[in-house]
Image: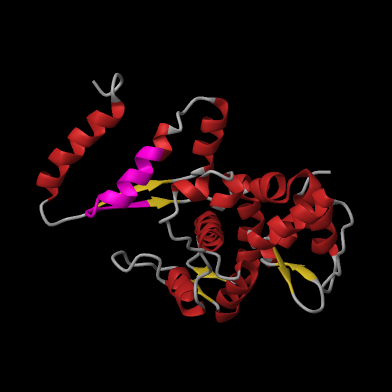
Amino acid sequence: RFEARPYEALDEWLGRAWKALQDFNLLLTFDEFEQAGAALESGQLSRNVLNQLRTLIEHQQKMALLFAGVQTLDELGPDYSSYFINARSLSMGYLERAEAEELIRNPDPQVPFELSYDDEVVEHIIEETLGHPYLVQLVCSCLVECANRHRTLHADEDLVEEAEELSFERGANYFNNIWLDMAGEDGQELLRQVAAAHEPLRLDPQDAARRKALSRMLRLKVLHRSEEGYTVEVPLVARWVNEYASD
């Protein structure tokens, strides 16, 4: 029945779901929402999907919808903003310093964590990752792996250096996504130049494609702009670009 008349079947299912939920609300989450845009463009999905989502947003009081992705609605296409006129955009930031330190020293309050850190190591991890949630957890996961390998329960500067090198391997998909998608072909040389500079670099690309790539990298927090010029926002990303980005 769902394959034949999916929207009616969904409405029927929701009617039963509300009774089962009683006083609870329902949260539907859509990760990598850009993939839906690609499927619509290729004809794999009907635009009726967007109509259905808009209807759910506007009329279902016990339901919330969360769309996660790296592109804004405007970047997905001119139609999306009208379909999601009631949606609210939220930009995800970094962990506060105290939050990052707590995650490093005590990753799970329910489980004893015996690995201890030099204060300099904690400070180094926070500075290199800027409190980026994924990168903090990536480096610390690699740090635990390295500590197990060396049969030690104490993390010093040598161990964190080894862990960062390992993080470039374990987090290859993340770093490659920055290089291939966030920077893209038009932005890669700009990113390489900024990463290699020892101080903020002034950039003024003349062609439209590079200007667009520069704007995209700023919005996605790959680059940071100040009065002095551009820097790579997260030091660990700059290091990866310098050491591992392909030509």
Please name the colour scheme applied to the rendered image: secondary structure
**Drawn side of residue 18 relative to residue 173, left or right:** left
Q: Residue 240 location in percent, x, y? A: 72, 56
Q: Nearer the viewer, residue 161 or 37?
A: 37
Q: Quadrant of the C terminus?
A: top right
| Helix, strand or loop for the magenta stretch, by majority | helix
Q: Residue at x 78, y 69 (%)?
A: 230
Q: Nearer the viewer, residue 45 or 84?
A: 84
- In the picture as drawn, the residue positioned furthest to the front comes out as 82
Determine if residue 42 is in view: yes
> Which quadrant of the rendered structure holds the N terminus?
top left
Return the residue nearer the eye: 142 or 201. 201
Residues in magenta, as a range? 51-65
Residue 170: x and y in percent read: 59, 48
The answer to whether one can see residue 71 in this image is no
Residue 24 located left or right of residue 52: left
Q: Is 6 inside the magenta-drawn segment?
A: no
In the image, residue 28 sits, relative to residue 96, either above or below, namely: above
Report the front residue among 36 and 99.
36
